[in-house]
Amino acid sequence: MSIVLVGINHKTAPVEVRELLAFSDRACTEGLPRLVDGEVVREGLIVSTCNRVEILSAITTDQLESGTQRIAEFLDAARNLPPGFLSDHLYSHTDENAIRHIFRVASSLDSMVVGEPQVLGQVRHAYSLAVEAGTAGRVLNRLVHHTFHVAKRVRSETGIASSAVSISYMAVELGKKIFDSLRGRVVMLIGAGEMAELSARHLVNAGATRVLIVNRTKESAERLAEEFKGLAVPFEQLPQSLSEADVVICSTGAPDYVVTADMVRSATEQKRNRPTCIIDISVPRNVDPAVGKVPNVFVFDIDDLESVITSNIREREREAERAELIVQSEVMQFQQSLRAMDIGPTIGALRQKLQQVARAEMERQRKRLGSLTPDQEAAIEALLMSTVNKISHPVLNQMRRSYELSDSETVQALRDIFGLEE
Amino acid sequence: MKSFLVAVVAAYLIAAIHSILAFVNKRAALQRVAEWSLAAGFVVHTITLLEDWTLDGHYPLFNLKETLSFLAWALVAVYGVVLYRYRAQAIGVFMMPLISILSCAALVIQTGPNDAPAAFSATWLFPVHTTLLIFAYAAFFVVFIASVMYLLQERELKLKTFSAIFYRLPSLATVNELATSAAALGLTLLTLGIASGMLWSSTRDGRVWHNDPKEIFAVLTWLLYLFLIIYRSTAGWRGRRAAWIGVAGFGLVLCTFFGARLLGGYHVFG
């Protein structure tokens, strides 16, 4: 059995092509049984995200070429694309390379933003769809579980996902750096822009309990207040309620400073010098840069965030190099465990060994039989072989069964009985 | 027990190296090695101290060798509490090398036979006095490290440029709280330590104050940390200025610790 991965990703295909190929959940569960015929393509799963469509499969080793071909054709046919439409974009990897590829994908090393956390969930989802469709078998089960293990290792042993690389997530990152935990913290949105909303959502997910929304138009403030179960604060009361906020996200379209140094200074006094993190993502800036001089107040404008993000991306790339080493060692480990598990060579060796014994005996006794016609010789050969096969049949069956049940002890015991090496 | 102390130093060195590696590489496995090794070292160290106590017949905190060893032991104990309460492993990067150096020095330093300690351990007040103060020093060292960490991070947050070390340090809130509670603990211990010292001195020769450098520095240290505690409690989070006091305070602690040795005075024994 060989592991084959065929697909396209954001590096090989533009979004126009990727969106044509994208598989919905239903398309996956319906398509998979058609792809997996049990003869050539034995197992399969489809990973479909906005950045990639990949089919991971287990193919009978001696049918490798036709199997790979079959997958490429399946991709064309499943999405009603003209044959050969994808050929410029498709890549296909076999065995070691395929294993490495899926490990890298799940560990987010192959992502557009290296270290983004969603892709592991997407691989997990792809696997559950394959399980549902009944197309995940012994090989893929093992491979996918090992993939999860690798992704977890990469995540915990490298800093690949440890720093924020998006503006909306920076708010969480900075909040945690200052307050340790965002649990129980109060978030204030000044202006109800989309970016502010996204940041607030991240902050609430990270534990922030209260959201105050200050906006010039009352309606959008109230809409957001409802969404976050927060409180809409009239614009005039901004200076007073500033002292309640721990994290402030400012994104109004105002042409001048909405938050001034005096305002922040008196708010800080009121909150007994507890720190405040102010994130100003509006252009032109809405927070007076002089606010940054107030003790225990930390202000970040859009350029500050961008430059931190740039350095974070570089940090991730450095960490990715370490992650590649982990992936490499895991690929080797997985291949080893796969070889140990693979029953094919054992069965072949057993059959060959028994046949050799029969042929050697025949060779020894051949002289006594005198001259034989070719037909007679063929009959003796057939007799010997069928005897060997009939005797070995139940043994081989038992071996296969034990193998299916992952009962490696029995497999090993059978190997030992017949004196077979690994 | 020299061979025991060698094992202790080895365990602390392993812990120090691993906690630095864990800090640099952000690997939980390395941190675990550091913590287990530290725990093992601490257990053996405790046994060593107890054994010294019973074999030598005096409380193992008198000459320089013993003081360094005991200080290392106290620092490990305090670090253990910090780890348990705050999971602030980064503190270890600064504490572990110091602990290793102290215990190494304790191993290397030789002291001649001296019958003075026996006289001092006749009364229980003297060991109490020294033990309290050693733990106070350890607590003030934690204040110092936490304050430095606070200042480093506060500076980077204000300048908006984050170095690699920034992501590896505990949050501002954590180091602020750590510094505050360690200062409170240290001040309590220092107060009790000074009081027990005065009491001991008055029972020994009827005087509570000898005007020697160590005493003067101790009182200055006490005043500074008292000021720090009051300063912090009057207006909540004081941030940078409080952190600077925490750093300056440790300078005084060092003067107190080494003061007697360098300047002489009443506190020179043995």
Image (spheres, rainbow, N blue to C red):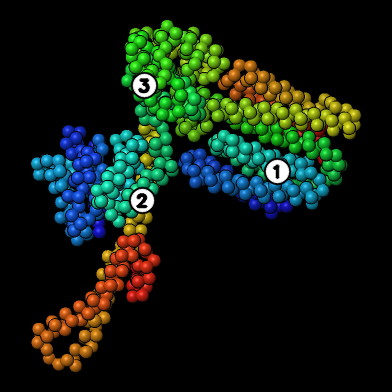
Give the Cα separation between the discs numbered 2 and 3.
40 Å
Residue type highlighted by circle 1: Ser
Question: For the residues carrying marks 2 and 3, which lies nearer the camera in this image?
Answer: 3
Q: Is residue A171 left or right of residue B58?
A: left
Look at the numbered disc 1 and give the secondary structure of its residue. helix
Residue at which label 3 appears? A227
Residue with the mark numbered 2: A146
At mark 3, the secondary structure is helix
Determine whether the residue tagged by mark 2 lies in a helix, strand or loop.
helix
Q: Chain of mark 1?
A: B
Image point (47%, 17%), residue name: A245
Q: Mark number for residue B69?
A: 1
Circle 2 crowding by C-alpha within 10 Å: few under 14, some 14–19, many from 20: some
The disc at residue B242 is none
User: What type is the residue that disc 3 sits on?
Assistant: Glu
Of residues B260 and B52, the one nearer the viewer is B52
Q: Residue at x 31, y 61 (%)?
A: A404
Q: Quadrant of residue A83?
A: top left
